[in-house]
Amino acid sequence: MSQHSSPWTHLRGLIITVPWLLYLLLVDISVSMLLPLAIFAPRWVYHASSYLAFTVWAWIQFVFEALNGAHVEISGDFLPSAESAIVVANHVAWSDFYLIQAVARRSGMLGYCRYFAKSQLKFVPFLGWGLWAMGMPMVSRNWLKDEAELDRVFSGLVSHSFPTWLISFSEATRFTKKKLAESQVWCKKNDRPQPRHLLYPRTKGFISTIRHLRKAPHVKAVYDLTIAYQCGGVFHEAPRMWDTLSVPDLSTKHRFRFHIHVRRFPLETLPESDQGLAQWLEQRWAEKGEWLESLKQAWSATGSS
């Protein structure tokens, strides 16, 4: 049992989440039923599914921030309202999507968030079909095999100018001590710089995304989001999934810190070559690592725990 949980918080979590889960099932069924219509009315289906997604994500965001008292600190660049963008972020915990959606909500893009999802989900009735109908890229992380899937997603974004935040966790997996050690070994073997507090980013998916979406005139920028947590003086200590749904006063009584730092890069400023794009992403991760270290020191100096 989590140190933040109790029998009362488990009961509270069930009371809060069961209605949302039932609504999520209803939305998944509804979006799945829209799937055949996407052939004839792709724009209408995209916007209808985006509105339904907005209601699901706004509800769970309300649970996290309002009911469970998570204070999300946002810093960095100003983001234009309703701007379509490619979004890259580090991956610490399941709760990362709350921080990303806190920024998306303030930018008027909550319903248009599209995450790269595992290809196996497409075989899950309703949930997988709903994600597919919404235009979520369903990938296996084998970029040669995923080319057709990416063409499907990107073609809609390009030909129909669908508004979107196309979100990718560029490390491809969550940050853990074991995976950090593996990243350090790989970086040393391949003579690559190991960023602080991060795993080395995967570049192939990022390059493919940029190459495709440069053809979409409404996609204006790349957003680089840096996610950080702290609890009990431990940096990168994030709440567990169930804690985010059940435990009240996350930022006060339980002293979780949630911070997301935003940087905006106009798409036309990125390099043209694949090698240049890989180096560009590598440089962003080096800068993210330095920023995370500075935040860690700042939180330590102020005694935030």
Image (cartoon, rainbow, N blue to C red):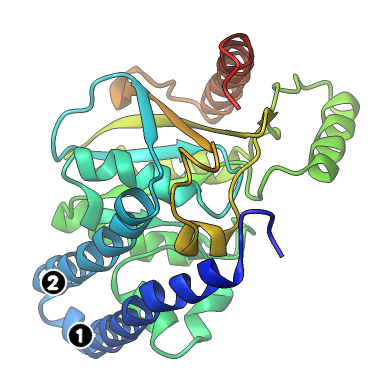
Q: Classify mark 2: helix, strand or loop.
A: helix
Please determine whether, in this image, residue 210 is positioned above or below residue 111: above
Q: Which residue is mark 1?
A: 34
Which percent across, then down, holds residue 86? 35, 40
Q: Nearer the viewer, residue 99 or 188?
A: 99
- Image quarter (top left, top right, bottom left or bottom right) of the N terminus: bottom right
Neighbour class for label 1 at 10 Å: few (<14), some, many (≥20)?
many
Are the residues tagged 1 and 2 within 8 Å (C-beta)?
yes
Residue beneath the point at 16% across and 44% down: 108
Apparent side of residue 137 relative to residue 284 in the rendered image (left or right) = left
Neighbour class for label 2 at 10 Å: few (<14), some, many (≥20)?
some
Q: Nearer the viewer, residue 296 or 165?
A: 296
Residue beneath the point at 40% across and 74% down: 17
Residue beneath the point at 39% across and 77% down: 15
Apparent side of residue 108 relative to residue 267 in the rendered image (left or right) = left
Instruction: For residue 212, say whether it is visible.
Output: no
Q: Which residue is mark 2?
A: 48
